[in-house]
Amino acid sequence: MTGIIDSHCHIDGEQFDEDRDEAVARARAAGVVAMLNVGTGDPHSDDFRRAVAVAEKYEGVYAAIGVHPHDAKLYDDAAEEHLVELARSEKVIAWGEIGLDYYYDHSPRDVQREVFRRQVRMARSLDLPIIIHSRDADDETVEILTEEFVTGQVEKEGRADRSVRGPGIMHCFGGTPEMAKALMEVGFLISFAGNVTFKKAENLRDAARVVPLDRLLIETDCPFLTPVPFRGKRNEPSFVIHTAKFLADFYGVDLETLADQTTTNFVELFRLNLAANYSKDTN
Ligand SMILES: [Zn+2]
Ligand SMILES: [Zn+2]
């Protein structure tokens, strides 16, 4: 196995203040060669700086920055400037998580939609893939992304030339098979978290059934959504292996095949060179 990737985690949070070094070390020992640490919080605070600092501290840890739909009401010019400044770090490889959350409705829906579109455009101007969060908003998420990436006239001038390979990742997939198909059509990779292992999550497995291995990613979304058999405990990146084993079984392939393919999907999306991380991790 060349390694496995946790495509979405939150290890900058206080839940890891006591043992962050150990959690990263445990992940490496488990074969996790890259982790995408997704910053969240108030864009006028130090929350995002902290997320980037964690990525800068550890080899194999990358960062995403962007304002979560919960906090959309806090997004303004100053917030955007702050994030664009942080995006200059080489460790920042994605913009997100952004999207719509109509389950909690922490920000008004019209504000969520507007801020979602605005961030999609900012990410594109920086040539950064986006990380999508969507809850109870399947149709509008698909509609906005299809408009922004397929049917709409989006200004492409002034794009940097990192030349990423796709629009991004639909994280912690929780929608219907139709939603997964529509987003793959736009070019997104579909990432499943530990909840796909839960007994009652037949709906998630129905969606996983339509996602081919070459569009698949896995994540922990830690500290949340701990997979079976650790359900109830704090989640951490090393546990991604349990979701990987579960999905390998589900797809009827061996763990190595699933790990290699999902690693390739991630590396190609971000045009990363993980060779350095592999060589350090294998001895
Ligand atoms: Zn999320
Ligand atoms: Zn998240």
Image (cartoon, grey):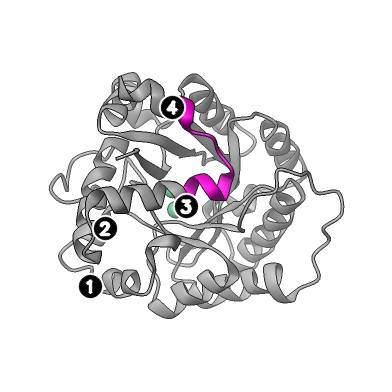
Q: Which residue is under mark 4?
A: 277
| Local crowd size for mark 1, using a 10 Å CA cut-off: few (<14), some (14–19), many (≥20) | few
SS class of the residue under badge 2? Answer: helix
Q: Name the residue under label 1.
A: 202
Q: Distance from label 1 to label 3 (Cα)? A: 25 Å
Picture residue at 25% right of the left edge, 65% below the top? 251
Which amino acid, mark 4?
Asn
Say which quadrant the C terminus sits in: top left
Residue named by callout 3 = 265
Q: Distance between the residues labelled 3 and 2?
A: 21 Å
Query: Element at badge 1?
Result: helix
Q: Distance between the residues labelled 3 and 4?
A: 17 Å
Residue 78 lies in magenta, yes or no? Answer: no
Residue situated in front as seen by the camera: 77 or 182? 182
Residue 133 is situated, as x and y percent measured from the top left of the image, at 49, 58
- Going by the picture, which residue comes out furthest to the bottom? 178
Q: In this view, does 83 lie to the left or right of 262?
A: right
The residue depicted at 24 percent of the width and 38 percent of the height is 234
Name the residue tied to disc 2: 195
Would you place residue 7 above or below residue 135 in this image? above
- Secondary structure mostly seen in magenta is helix
Q: What stretch is highlighted in magenta?
A: 266-277
N-terminal of the pair, mark 1 or mark 3, is 1
Question: Mark 3 touching mark 4, by CB under 8 A?
Answer: no
Do the numbered discs 3 and 2 sit on residues whose CB atoms are within 8 Å? no
